[in-house]
Image (tube, grey):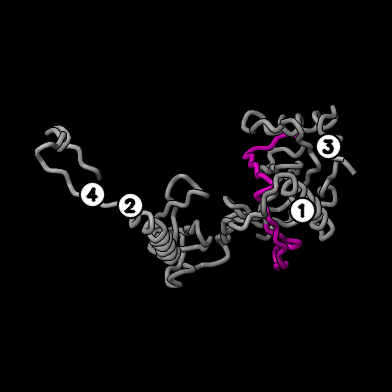
């Protein structure tokens, strides 16, 4: 059905309507073969508190953003390739019901639906699209996922030292490796994690030591792999200084949560049943 709808006028109009809602702040969404399958409002567990977000499910990407005026204006657009997504159903909490986690290599976060039925529909549609994409590309499901950030209100003290109490003056920080809420003293280190960012990111002291140990192991493994190559190379006697072509110029060069967001009108909406 997706292939049949890919180049239809109604599908193009629906995608254009989503692009118009995001306006100039959003990226173009219309590409050959892309189909808009449905949309809905989900509650996303954000750092400060749960917030409503609009989600659009296409056959190859998941798009979400902040709601300015429902059905008319959205901003803060995020695009997630579905082949990088895995899902995990989560138990209910006192504040949030019908929860599940959307996990990717760059960002993972928790969302909740207005009802159990709506959660089942979202997960079913997502899993079907992911399965179809992986079959089409021959890729294996992603196994590396970014840790979701623990909400600020989940703790009043640093989750590493358990001594520092957060206040107006003592800020909360998040480790980009484990997602824990930590104090400044427990997260002074930065580490380069290319799959998350091209820049070094804040990590807690424990994760920093673990990342350094992993980096050291990788370096040692590389050395072991190169040893047979080095030992197989023939040795040469150094040449005499008399016929050296090294000039004086060469010598200078050296090598160096509680809000209710839903009503009965906002739920999963499938365009193509």
Question: Whole-percent x and y of residue 225?
Answer: 42, 58
Q: Which residue is mark 1?
A: 127
Is 204 colored magenta in this rendering?
no
Q: Label 1, secondary structure: give it.
A: helix
Name the front one of labels 1 and 2. 2
Question: Whole-percent x and y of residue 10?
Answer: 85, 30
Residue 228, relative to residue 196: is it above or below? below
Left/right of residue 208 with respect to residue 15 in the rendered view: left
**Which numbered disc covers residue 3?**
3
Is 90 colored magenta in this rendering?
yes
Residue 74: quadrant of the picture: top right
Callouts 3 and 1 close, C-beta under 8 Å: no
Marks 4 and 2, how far apart at CA: 10 Å
Earlier-in-chain disc, 3 versus 2: 3
- Answer whether residue 208 is visible to the viewer in this image: no
For label 2, the crowd category at 10 Å Cα-Cα, with few meaning under 14, some 14 to 19 and many 20 or more, is: few
For label 4, the crowd category at 10 Å Cα-Cα, with few meaning under 14, some 14 to 19 and many 20 or more, is: few
For label 3, the crowd category at 10 Å Cα-Cα, with few meaning under 14, some 14 to 19 and many 20 or more, is: few
Name the front one of labels 3 and 2. 2
Looking at the rendering, the stretch of residues picked out in magenta corresponds to 72-101
Marks 1 and 4, how far apart at CA: 60 Å
Q: Label 4, secondary structure: give it.
A: loop
**Which numbered disc covers residue 233?**
2
- Answer whether residue 173 is visible to the viewer in this image: yes
Name the front one of labels 1 and 4. 4
**Looking at the rendering, in which quadrant would you find the C terminus?**
top right
Q: Depth check: 126 or 174 in front? A: 126
Question: Whole-percent x and y of residue 100?
Answer: 71, 60
Q: Residue at x 74, y 44 (%)?
A: 136
Q: Which residue is mark 4?
A: 236
């Amino acid at each position: 059905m997706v292939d049949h709808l890919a180049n239809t006028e109604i599908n193009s109009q629906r995608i254009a309507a989503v692009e118009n809602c995001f306006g100039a702040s959003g990226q173009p969404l219309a590409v050959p073969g892309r189909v808009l399958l449905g949309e809905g409002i989900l509650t996303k567990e954000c750092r400060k508190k749960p917030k409503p977000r609009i989600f659009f499910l296409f056959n190859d990407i998941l798009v979400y953003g902040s709601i300015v005026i429902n059905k008319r204006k959205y901003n803060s657009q995020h695009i997630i390739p579905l082949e990088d997504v895995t899902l995990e159903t989560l138990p209910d909490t006192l504040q949030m019901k019908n929860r599940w986690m959307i996990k990717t290599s760059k960002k993972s976060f928790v969302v909740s639906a207005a009802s159990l039925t709506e959660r089942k529909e979202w997960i079913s549609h997502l899993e079907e699209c992911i399965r179809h994409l992986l079959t089409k590309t021959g890729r294996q499901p992603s196994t590396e996922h970014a840790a979701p950030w623990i909400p600020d209100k989940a703790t009043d003290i640093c989750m590493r030292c358990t001594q520092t109490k957060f206040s107006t003056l003592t800020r909360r920080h998040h480790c980009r490796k484990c997602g824990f809420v930590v104090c400044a003293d427990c997260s002074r280190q930065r580490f380069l994690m290319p799959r998350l960012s091209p820049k070094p990111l804040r990590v807690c002291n424990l994760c920093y030591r673990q990342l350094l140990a992993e980096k050291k192991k990788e370096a040692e493994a590389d050395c072991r792999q190169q040893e047979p190559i080095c030992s197989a190379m023939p040795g040469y006697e150094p040449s005499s200084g008399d016929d050296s072509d090294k000039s004086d110029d060469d010598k200078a060069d050296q090598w160096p949560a509680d809000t209710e967001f839903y009503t009965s009108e906002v739920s999963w909406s499938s365009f193509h049943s």
